[in-house]
Image: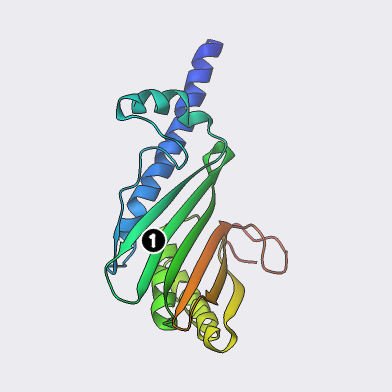
């Protein structure tokens, strides 16, 4: 028979393992994203807003990591190619260490084909629930169509679902030559019209 203390320790170990798995996913993501036009900064051991000294990392992981309600990592990149001003990814997790949202941010010249390719690859590199390699083409085409419309309108918004992933894009001009493009990816269990998805992500 297990004591109540043993049960709490086992639960804490399971929650800590989920936190570490999320951190590992965030750390591995830049290396999977095919974007040689930037250099990525290292991902910190602790999420944004936490400042923990190296000698306190083990204690923080033991005492705090399992019980976080919400946390996030902002993964910054330094552009090393002309035409790109800013790139970062914002990972958010909620209670129970569940994935909540990934936001990709680009400030660059308006090049619809390039942006559509890189943003689609960034979503695919995240390896989120239900993502399939064949989803890449559909996301790329959706992004490309929307971004092509920016030149004549000054800005666009749109949504697209790929399996269990709901992608929402905004793109708007900030000067005569530059745009800011963001794609926010969340998990969904419904189609665009609100009907429930099947177990394989279809409807």
Left-right relation of 194 to 124: right
**Percent position (x, y) of residue 68?**
53, 33
- Dividing the picture into quadrants, the one containing residue 47 is top left
Q: Say whether residue 169 is visible.
A: yes
Residue drawn at 33 percent across, 51 percent down: 28
**Percent position (x, y) of residue 46?**
40, 37
In the foreground, 13 or 85: 85
Colour scheme: rainbow
**Percent position (x, y) of residue 141?**
49, 80
> From the image, which quarter does the C terminus lie in?
bottom right
Q: Say whether residue 127 is visible.
A: no
Residue drawn at 50 percent across, 56 percent down: 102
Secondary structure beneath label 1: helix
Give the residue at the far bottom of this rendering.
Answer: 152
Q: How many marks?
A: 1
In the foreground, 111 or 17: 111
Left-right relation of 63 to 184: left
Residue tagged 1: 125
Residue drawn at 51 percent across, 81 percent down: 147
* Vertical relation: 18 (above or below) 77: above
* Vertical relation: 60 (above or below) 184: above
Residue drawn at 39 percent across, 65 percent down: 86
**Percent position (x, y) of residue 49?**
47, 39
Left-right relation of 36 to 120: left
* Vertical relation: 168 (above or below) 4: below
- Dividing the picture into quadrants, the one containing residue 53 is top left
Callout 1 crowding tier (Cα within 10 Å): few <14, some 14–19, many ≥20: some
Give the residue at the far front of this rendering.
Answer: 175
* Vertical relation: 107 (above or below) 18: below
């Amino acid at each position: 028979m297990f004591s109540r203390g043993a049960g709490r320790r086992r639960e804490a170990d399971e929650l800590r393992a989920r936190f570490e798995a999320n951190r590992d996913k965030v750390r591995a993501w830049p290396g999977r994203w095919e974007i040689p036009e930037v250099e990525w900064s290292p991902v910190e051991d602790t999420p944004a807003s936490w400042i923990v000294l190296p000698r306190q990392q083990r204690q923080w992981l033991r005492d705090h990591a399992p019980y976080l309600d919400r946390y996030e990592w902002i993964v910054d990149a330094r552009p090393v190619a002309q035409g790109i001003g800013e790139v970062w990814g914002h990972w958010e997790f909620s209670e129970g260490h569940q994935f909540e949202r990934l936001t990709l941010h680009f400030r660059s010249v308006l090049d619809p084909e390039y942006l559509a390719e890189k943003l689609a690859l960034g979503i695919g590199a995240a390896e989120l629930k239900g993502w399939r390699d064949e989803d890449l083409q559909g996301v790329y085409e959706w992004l490309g169509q929307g971004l092509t419309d920016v030149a004549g309108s000054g800005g666009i918004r749109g949504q697209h679902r790929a399996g269990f992933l709901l992608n929402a894009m905004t793109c708007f001009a900030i000067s005569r030559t530059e745009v800011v493009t963001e794609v926010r990816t969340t998990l969904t269990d419904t189609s665009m019209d609100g009907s429930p998805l099947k177990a394989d992500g279809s409807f």
